[in-house]
Image (cartoon, helix red, strand yellow):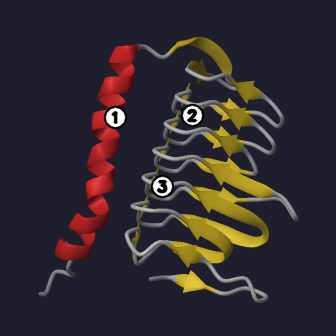
Amino acid sequence: MPLFEFEGKVPVVDETAYVFPTAVVIGNVKIGREVWVGPGAVLRGDYGEIEVGDYTAVEDNVVIHARPGEKTTIGKHVTLGHMSVIHTPIIGDWAVIGMNSTISDFAKVGTWAAVAEGAVVRNRSEIPEEGIAAGVPAKVIGKVTEEYKKLWEDYKNNYNTFCRRYRDNLAPVKK
């Protein structure tokens, strides 16, 4: 597992989590139960703190960081889409952060909120609980439905199984 101590700060990764071999976890980072961290992801707790809640999916090439002395907080059952940038926000449980989106400093994304692909949630802005936000800058354009929640619960459960499945079945191809 690609974990690195930095200036006495050591990542803490739950034994049920899975961190892909090409991901990087540095310093003051706490990764919860059955968190799946995909290829190329970077969680850099060098001068800030990062906490990733249980059952969260940190997809391929996601970057998570925090400002000096500050904390990035990611709730439980969150999906961080491919190539998203997460920098010192608070993200509530069950939120979905779309691919290639940015959640900036001190922003708040509520429980079950959804941020569309490519959106930019600016510094200190807020996406309310169950809000759907899109655009640059992100603006609330709707509300999450019960159908959406059911669909995403199923998707999120797939990622939770990846921890065990990757640990048990991932192997380099021999030529």
- Crowd band around label 1 with a 10 angstrom C-alpha radius: few (<14), some (14–19), many (20+): few
**In-front residue for pair 83/156:** 156
Is residue 12 placed above or below 74 in the rendered structure? Answer: below
- Residue tagged 3: 54
In the rendered structure, the answer to whether residue 46 lies left or right of residue 150 reads right
Q: Helix, strand, or loop for circle 1?
A: helix
- Residue tagged 1: 153
- Res 88 label: none
- The tag earlier along the polypeptide, 2 or 1, is 2
- Residue tagged 2: 118
Is residue 142 placed above or below 155 in the rendered structure? Answer: above
Amino acid type, mark 3: Asp
Q: Is residue 137 visible?
A: no
Q: Tell whether label 3 touches label 2 (CB within 8 Å).
A: no
- Crowd band around label 3 with a 10 angstrom C-alpha radius: few (<14), some (14–19), many (20+): many
In the rendered structure, the answer to whether residue 145 lies left or right of residue 119 reads left
Please state the horizontal and vertical placement of residue 165, each as a whole percent of the image.
21, 65
In the rendered structure, the answer to whether residue 47 lies left or right of residue 97 reads right
Residue at x-position 51% and y-position 32%: 117
Residue at x-position 20% and y-position 79%: 171
Q: Report how far apart the C-alphas of labels 2 and 3 lie in the structure.
A: 25 Å
